[in-house]
Image: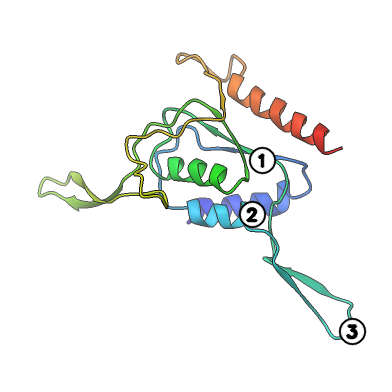
Amino acid sequence: MRSFRSFLRELMVDVYDKEALIVDVRYNGGGHTHDRLLSVLGRPTYFYLEDRAGAIREYQPKFHWGKPAVTLTNEYSFSDAEIFPFSFRKLGIGKLIGVPTGGGVIGTGGVRLLDGTWFRLPSSGCFTLEGETLENMGIEPDIYIENPPEQDFSETSDAQLEMAVEELLKQLSEKE
């Protein structure tokens, strides 16, 4: 929840006036924030409130991105970091760029063992509305581009990120 609040604060304060957004879920082991993120990025404005004098208008939801966006994925995107890009594309928010996700979508619970270690147990699956499981599937990107496995991002460029910027610039030029 802390990471979502941080994302929302950055989106509403630092990014709100920007023309496009890159959501990077690479190297994300999962969690449970996809629904919150998608409600901010994918839910359109559906009505507004106005005071009787017509001076103040407040749109609902109060914040909605509604601008070009892409999501970066890789083979180290697991669980919720696979549900998010699947839904991101399904809702038509934007394209996926990178390589297929790891295919590790499964809900788990855990038990602490006597020696203090933690043991995870599968507890639920994630399915499309058509009944297909997302487990072991891997979410395919719309634009496939690899980064070398040995890549040190502090010393070299990031081909996936560069492609994301290129794609968003293309989308922005098409809008004009």
Q: Which residue is located at x 18 percent, y 44 percent?
A: 117
Note whether 166 is above or below 54 in the view shown.
above
Indicate the quadrant containing the C terminus: top left, top right, bottom left or bottom right: top right
Q: Give SS at disc 2.
A: helix
Visual colour scheme: rainbow
Residue type at the position of mark 2: Arg
Left or right of 79, for residue 148? right
Q: Residues within 10 Å of mark 3 (few under 14, many from 20)?
A: few
Marks 3/1: CA–CA distance? 36 Å
Foreground of the two, 87 or 109: 87
In terms of sequence position, does the residue under pointer 2 or pointer 3 come before the other?
2
In terms of sequence position, does the residue under pointer 3 or pointer 1 come before the other?
3
Q: Which numbered dot is residue 69?
A: 1
Q: Which residue is located at x 58 percent, y 49 percent?
A: 91
Q: Give SS at disc 1.
A: strand
Q: Which residue is mark 2?
A: 9
Residue type at the position of mark 1: Ala
Residue 158 visible at all = no
Q: Position of residue 53 (x, y in %)?
A: 89, 84
Q: Give SS at disc 3.
A: loop
